[in-house]
């Protein structure tokens, strides 16, 4: 293969595994792991199937997916014509382009087989390498560079690779995560055509990160492709790269080198690590399938039910304002006390004051049809005082006001923790996703309006439990 170009190109054209281990042999310092072979096999198997790879830091995923695959996609049997690689920042994009160029310049055999090439700057500001003998192009760009309508001659991108397009900062808030997700769906994917392949590689930075959202879509068959998940040590305690870490001592040495336990858990074991001041943990959240019909209690009375609608109104409707949040919950009496079923008609919108009034009235009337006892729960502070006053003026709406009593938001949320953990508060399987997101990631999310409305309902139950008029069960 070293001496005969025809032989090596014939072999490496058909096999990405041979291509990688031949042209990129200087990267292979340890025995190739089974998970790396799986990545290579899936890359080689299809030129259209999407591939999503979450793997531990130092796993070699970027070398395989971002450094080697785009070259083989052009030189090999897939015969791609326009490859676009995305990095998170322009600095990272420039560094990756430098690495590609250096590889093509210093790797003599690769240069002979793929060259000649030239580097240029495209009209949209991204850097590109153009290969004369195959009439193909590799472009490297950052997520903040628009690629709408880009083409290489008649070719739209036929391979798109996203490598670590998120970091801790960009995944910190839901707005940041939404921005990356919308960028992928509205900018990246439409840039290709029906045969374009999408490959995304990264670490597990957040349970609501881009890759985790794509995993959920894959599990629900919303999208096609393969989702691969490789921690350094799997759930059975087996190291996935014995070639690099043959003993427990080697793993421990790597752990000590990392130093930070949170980094080790998140970047190497792919465990989501909550912040030290997290109030509610995701594993505490419990769900219900349906709300049971009221039953006879041991005292002979029919179980009492009451809907309480927590409202946290916004000051204005501007883009920078908070959202108006409305969270309804059904209080359900049992022999042991009260359960709270969070109902799925949750509102989280930017509404002005008149719109808030109309939304509240609509929700109240919808529940009043099924539950005689229905009331609003609104804080009696600052500008929020106007809402219960207006509701009482406009009709016979039962309004309960609460006062936080100087407690901060986190302290009030903490008061709900035991009720959530013990299953006294249950959530619907669908319809409360954003509420749960804000509860679990309180203090990190940009908005917490739903948390405020939720806390209003729960704390009203703690402070003012129902005093039901008793109906004897016959």
Image (cartoon, rainbow, N blue to C red):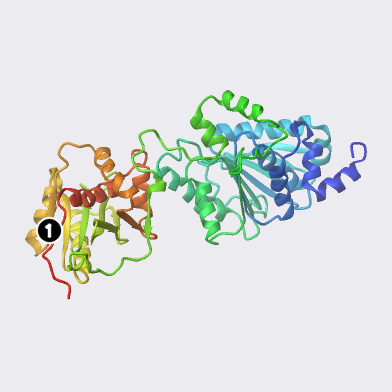
Along the line of sight, which residue is nearer the eye, 137 or 170? 170
Classify 98 as above or below 449.
above
Secondary structure of residue under mark 1: loop
- Total of numbered circles in the picture? 1
Instruction: Please identify the residue farthest to the left as the structure is shown.
Output: 393
Whether residue 31 can be seen here: yes
Task: Report the side of 275 relative to 197 (left or right).
Answer: left
Q: Which quarter of the picture shows residue 417? A: top left
Whether residue 89 can be seen here: no
Instruction: Please identify the residue farthest to the right as the structure is shown.
Output: 3
Estimate the x, y position of residue 73 in percent, counting from the top left.
73, 48
- Name the residue carrying label 1: 467
The residue drawn where x is 68% and y is 49% is 82
The residue drawn where x is 40% and y is 46% is 282
Estimate the x, y position of residue 155 in percent, counting from the top left.
67, 54
Along the line of sight, which residue is nearer the eye, 459 or 189? 459
Task: Report the side of 471 relative to 282 (left or right).
Answer: left
Along the line of sight, which residue is nearer the eye, 25 or 421? 421
The quarter of the image holding the N terminus is top right
Estimate the x, y position of residue 447 in percent, counting from the top left.
32, 44
Task: Report the side of 263 relative to 367 (left or right).
Answer: right
The residue drawn where x is 52% and y is 61% is 220
Classify 113 as above or below 290.
above
The residue drawn where x is 11% and y is 48% is 385
Estimate the x, y position of residue 204 in percent, counting from the top left.
53, 41
């Amino acid at each position: 293969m070293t001496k005969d170009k025809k032989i090596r190109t014939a072999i490496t054209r058909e096999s990405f595994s041979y291509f990688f281990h031949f042209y990129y042999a200087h990267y292979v310092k340890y025995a190739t792991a089974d998970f790396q072979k799986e990545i290579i096999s899936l890359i080689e198997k299809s030129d259209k199937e999407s591939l999503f790879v979450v793997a531990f830091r130092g796993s070699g995923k970027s070398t395989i997916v971002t450094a080697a695959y785009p070259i083989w996609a052009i030189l090999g049997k897939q015969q791609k014509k326009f490859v676009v690689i995305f990095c998170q920042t322009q600095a990272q994009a420039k560094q990756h382009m430098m690495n590609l160029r250096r590889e093509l310049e210093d790797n003599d055999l690769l240069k002979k087989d793929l060259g000649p090439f030239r580097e240029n700057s495209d009209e949209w500001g991204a850097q590109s390498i153009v290969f004369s003998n195959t009439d193909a192009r590799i472009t490297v760009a950052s997520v903040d560079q628009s690629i709408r309508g880009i083409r290489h001659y008649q070719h739209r991108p036929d391979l798109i690779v996203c490598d670590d397009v998120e970091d801790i900062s960009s995944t910190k808030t839901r707005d940041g995560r939404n921005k990356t997700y919308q960028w992928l769906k509205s900018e990246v994917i439409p840039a290709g055509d029906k045969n374009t392949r999408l490959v995304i590689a990264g670490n597990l930075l957040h349970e609501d990160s881009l890759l985790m959202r794509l995993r959920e879509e894959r599990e629900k068959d919303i999208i096609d492709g393969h989702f691969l998940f490789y921690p350094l040590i799997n759930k059975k305690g087996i190291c996935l790269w014995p070639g690099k870490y043959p003993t427990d001592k080697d793993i421990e040495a790597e752990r000590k080198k990392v130093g930070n336990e949170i980094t080790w858990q998140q970047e190497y074991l792919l465990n989501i690590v909550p912040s030290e001041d997290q109030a509610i943990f995701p594993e505490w959240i419990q769900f219900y399938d349906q709300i049971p019909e009221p039953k006879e209690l041991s005292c002979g009375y029919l179980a009492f039910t009451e809907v309480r609608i927590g409202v946290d109104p916004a000051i204005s409707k501007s883009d920078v304002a908070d959202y108006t949040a409305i969270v309804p919950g059904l209080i359900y009496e049992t022999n042991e006390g009260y359960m709270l079923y969070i109902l799925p008609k949750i509102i989280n919108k930017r509404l002005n004051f008149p719109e808030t009034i109309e939304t509240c009235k609509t929700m109240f009337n919808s529940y009043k049809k099924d539950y005689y006892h229905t009331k609003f729960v609104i804080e009696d502070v600052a500008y929020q005082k106007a809402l219960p006053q207006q509701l009482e003026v406009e009709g016979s709406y039962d309004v309960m006001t609460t006062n936080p009593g100087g407690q901060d938001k986190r302290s009030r949320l903490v008061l709900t923790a035991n009720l959530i953990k013990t299953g006294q508060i249950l959530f619907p399987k669908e319809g409360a996703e954003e509420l749960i997101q804000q509860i679990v990631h309180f203090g990190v999310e940009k908005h917490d309006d739903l948390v405020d409305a939720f806390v209003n309902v729960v704390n009203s139950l703690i402070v003012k439990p129902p005093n039901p008029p008793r109906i004897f069960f016959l």
